[in-house]
Image (spheres, grey):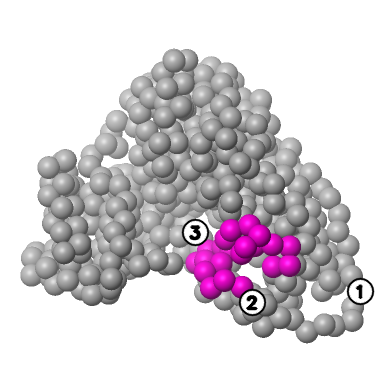
Amino acid sequence: MDIPPNVFKAYDIRGLVDSELNSDFAFETGVAFARFLQIEREPATVVIGEDMRPSSPLLAEAFSAGVTSQGMDVIRIGLASTDLMYFASGKLGLPGAMFTASHNPAEYNGIKLCLSQARPIGKESGLLTIEKFVREGSPITLRNVGIEKHQNMLEEYVDHLLTLVDLREIRPLKLVIDAGNGMAGYTAPAIFARLNCEVIPMYFELDGSFPNHEANPLDESTLVDLKKAVKEHSADLGLAFDGDADRCFLIDENGEGINPSFLTALIAERQLKKNPGSKIIYNLISSRTVQEVISENNGIGLRSRVGHSNIKKLMAETGAIFGGEHSGHFYFKDFWRADSGALAALHAIAALGTSKASISELLASYSRYVQSGEINTKVADVQQATEIVKQRYSSTEVEIDYLDGLTVNGDSWWFNLRPSNTEPLLRLNVEAKDQAQMQSIRDQVLALIRN
């Protein structure tokens, strides 16, 4: 099958509806996924979930037809957040597929795939094989067609989440939740109806055209309405979810965004109190605060490359109980090592609800450094630009590593420069002890790569 070159990404499949992703593509991908699962000796039933985008049901139906054409069965769980699909994969012990383009604009859709027990499938762990099968086409074989059935798992998902975080003794809280017209508008009502919380909903109507703002909390402009609402309602906490609700971002009672690394540190501290001496994973653009908090609580911190496949793989290899990414993804061993925005939010609510402090007071001790945020720069030659930066800093008293791009560690600062997987971009993250030092390092590195 002739397909665009960049539809198969590092961790999932994503592209423009109709011109790149259509029913024919979804059918062929379903066939290819079934072939891959047979090679991997996976169970012969696939769980399929879908988000609220208008194209998702049609694509999921075509994909299901492709899977069943190979003699495998399908369980359609219908509307779902990505972590609800992971729950279904883990609970039922089956491989899964989720139709979503996450935080991408309305004209996109995509497919996230996993093996049974929600084990990740990335470029190096299956996506390249599936892409090869799609491009080459699959031989026609005579076999019985599999069976498709439907099963709603929302309440079981909520039941499971509430066994993982103790929320029985929390004080009354007022929350503003911005679902961004995404899948949190489906899952949040079922979850928060059981908590001692007053919920002020924002944009809970499922609408894949995203009429209010894109469901992408990484973009500060999408948080304007939520920040305003938190202050207007004198809320204790604001929650912002992305389109498929596998990521969650927090807004404090003053209407200020909370650094995702602070939530990683908070959950790590909570988990280590229950499991002393355990391993915690954080990606290498997380704040130094995270490693410091892990050490202060007698845990073992492990740095990881960016990306869910990398973190889930490292969790499986090391037995780590929790992993956090600065992008707002949080991974839990007791949730099949999968990421869940809802579960991360429940940990924050439990910590806040069992404290007399506000959320800003609760997290104040984690505010130890200043970060630049991620800065993207187009360059003609990624390797050459990186080498120029490396040569500039090799002559100074720093530590350099290449775990994911180039990381340079000074005594009170660090920066990471890593290439994009799909574009001629370099992504820069800088952290330092104070604003002046951060800006100085940031401007030095940007000058090197842009000149």
Q: Is residue 10 magenta?
A: yes
Contact between labelled residues 2 and 3, with CB atoms less than 8 Å apart? no
* Most distant residue in the front direction: 19
- Which residue has dot 2 on it? 2
The structure residue drawn at horizontal position 63% and vertical position 42%, both measured from the top left corner, is: 208
Q: CA distance from mark 1 to mark 2?
A: 28 Å
Q: Nearer the viewer, mark 3 or mark 2?
A: 2
Q: CA distance from mark 3 to mark 2?
A: 28 Å
Mark found first going from the N terminus, 3 or 1: 1
The amino acid pointed to by label 3 is His
Residue 178: percent from the left, percent from the top? 53, 31
Give the class, few, some or many, for how many residues have Cα within 10 Å of label 2's Cα (few <14, many ≥20): few
- Which residue has dot 3 on it? 308
The structure residue drawn at horizontal position 69% and vertical position 56%, both measured from the top left corner, is: 89
Q: Quadrant of residue 167?
A: top right
Residue 168: percent from the left, percent from the top? 59, 25
Whether residue 95 sits left or right of residue 347 in the image: it is: right
The dominant secondary structure in magenta is: loop
Q: Is residue 243 magenta?
A: no
Q: Which residues are magenta?
A: 3-25
Residue 45: percent from the left, percent from the top? 79, 64
The amino acid pointed to by label 2 is Asp
Whether residue 197 sits left or right of residue 52 in the image: it is: left
- Which residue has dot 1 on it? 144
Q: Nearer the viewer, residue 216 or 24?
A: 24
The structure residue drawn at horizontal position 13% and vertical position 57%, both measured from the top left corner, is: 444
Q: Nearer the viewer, mark 1 or mark 2?
A: 2
